[in-house]
Every structure is written in structure tokens, then in C-alpha cells.
């Protein structure tokens, strides 16, 4: 079990992904100001994530592979970060919560996604899907496979998984993150922290219950 001293040591170690004597991630734009990088990153990732929403839901043999998650990360961040699409190679923490050690990420990610594939077959109701999403978001979040962008990539991945579930289980749901309000953001933040520390999924279930919507079916009418 990591001690507070271990965590502080990790936090105080210079990241290989950052510019020397800095916490700013090395990027292709050569941006060394964190606020500027945040703005550029948000804009680029938002455009790339929006583009992904126009694409068809992948088949099971592609979707339920660990390298598909890496493929999404590469698609979203390859214009900005050299580590796009790569599993992180250093320990990271958030607050006092340490994430999965790098040497275990690949195997844990593979096992988690394999189990996820099996569990998709059991989805019959909205409540089933909400529980599924809360559980797997928590599991994938604690693995935290990337140096940056984990939350956005996990939400996009689960959006695609919900599309797969709906297509293959005769359901009609989608994950819609377009109208997230302050309460949703709070539930996601609290859920990420609490589930990592205690395994309690209630905040995450509130978040996914709010963002999992029935699809609006467009109907054309003949005159």
C-alpha cells in the first residue's frame, strides 16, 4: 500500500513527459505556458471527439481490444502530444490516489475489456447499463492508461460501447455528454475520487443515469 511519503516522492519527480523544470507537457506546438496549452488542448480534443461521433459503431472484434482504446487516444491527441496512443511509462497520482503502475497497465486493461465484452450481453434495461457504465468507468479510470486525457477518452470509449450494446441488445440508448451541467460535473468528479478510494459507485451512477438517454428517432413523413 503506497504511503504518503511514496506519493509525495512521485509527485515531486520530474516527469519525462514534461519540459525540464516544468509541469507543462511536451507538445508539438512548443507551448510552454500551461494556460495556453489547456486552451489549445481543449479545442483540438473537442473537434476530434466531435468527429468520432460521426463514425459508425465498431464491430466487437475491434471495439473490445485494449489497442482500440489506444487508437482513440491517438486519434484525439496525435496533433498535439508525442505520447498520443501510448500507454504511460511513469507513475502518476491525483490527490492522494495513485493509479495503476505502468508495468501492469497492459494486462489489467486487457482483462477489464475482455470482461466488459462478456458483460455487454447481459444488458436489458437502462439500470443495467448505468450500473455497467459506472463500474467500468471506475475500473478503467483507476488503470488510467494515458499520461493525459484519460477521462475524455474513457467517456468516448464508453459512448461507443453503449452504441454497440444498443445495436446488439435491441435497445435504444446513447451516451450524450453535450448538456452536462454543474451537478453532472460534480457527480463525475466525486465519483472518480470516491470509487477509486472506496469502490462506491453511487456518484458515477448518478452521472451516467443523467447522461444515458433514449435515442430520438427521426421520422420522415410523406406528404
Image (cartoon, rainbow, N blue to C red):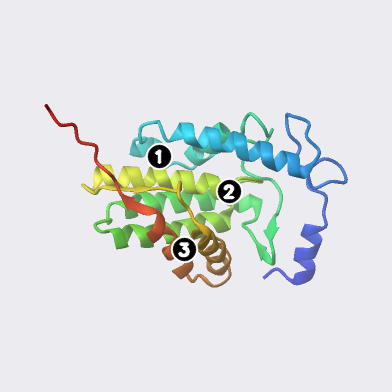
Tell me if label 2 and label 3 are in contact, CB under 8 Å.
no
The 10 Å Cα crowd at callout 1, few under 14, some 14 to 19, many 20 or more, is some
On the image, the x and y values in percent for residue 89 come to 69, 45
The 10 Å Cα crowd at callout 2, few under 14, some 14 to 19, many 20 or more, is some
Tell whether 60 sits left or right of 138: left
On the image, the x and y values in percent for residue 179 come to 45, 50
Looking at the figure, which quarter contains the C terminus?
top left
Q: Decide which of tag 2 and tag 3 comes sooner along the chain.
A: 2
Q: Nearer the viewer, residue 196 or 43?
A: 43
Looking at the figure, which quarter contains the N terminus?
bottom right
Q: Which mark is residue 6?
A: none
Which element is circle 1 on?
A: helix
Residue with the mark numbered 2 = 150
Residue 27 figure quarter: top right
The 10 Å Cα crowd at callout 3, few under 14, some 14 to 19, many 20 or more, is many
Tell me if label 1 and label 2 are in contact, CB under 8 Å.
no
Amino acid at each position: 500500500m503506497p504511503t504518503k511519503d511514496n506519493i509525495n516522492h512521485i509527485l515531486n519527480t520530474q516527469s519525462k513527459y514534461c519540459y525540464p523544470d516544468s509541469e507543462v507537457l511536451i507538445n508539438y506546438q512548443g507551448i510552454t505556458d500551461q494556460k495556453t496549452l489547456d486552451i489549445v488542448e481543449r479545442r483540438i480534443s473537442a473537434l476530434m471527439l466531435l468527429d468520432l461521433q460521426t463514425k459508425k459503431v465498431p464491430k466487437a472484434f475491434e471495439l473490445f481490444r485494449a489497442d482500440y482504446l489506444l487508437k482513440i487516444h491517438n486519434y484525439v491527441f496525435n496533433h498535439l502530444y508525442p505520447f498520443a496512443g501510448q500507454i504511460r511509462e511513469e507513475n502518476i497520482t491525483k490527490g492522494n490516489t495513485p493509479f495503476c503502475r505502468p508495468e501492469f497497465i497492459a494486462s489489467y486493461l486487457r482483462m477489464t475489456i475482455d470482461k466488459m465484452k462478456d458483460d455487454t450481453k447481459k444488458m436489458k434495461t437502462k439500470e443495467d447499463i448505468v450500473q455497467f457504465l459506472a463500474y467500468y468507468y471506475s475500473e478503467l479510470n483507476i488503470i488510467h492508461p494515458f499520461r493525459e486525457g484519460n477521462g475524455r477518452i474513457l467517456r468516448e470509449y464508453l459512448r461507443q460501447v453503449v452504441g454497440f450494446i444498443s445495436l446488439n441488445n435491441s435497445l435504444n440508448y446513447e451516451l450524450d455528454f453535450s448538456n452536462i451541467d454543474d451537478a453532472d460535473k460534480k457527480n463525475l468528479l466525486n465519483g472518480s475520487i470516491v470509487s477509486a478510494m472506496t469502490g462506491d459507485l453511487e456518484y458515477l451512477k448518478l452521472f451516467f443515469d443523467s447522461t444515458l438517454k433514449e435515442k430520438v428517432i427521426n421520422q420522415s413523413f410523406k406528404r
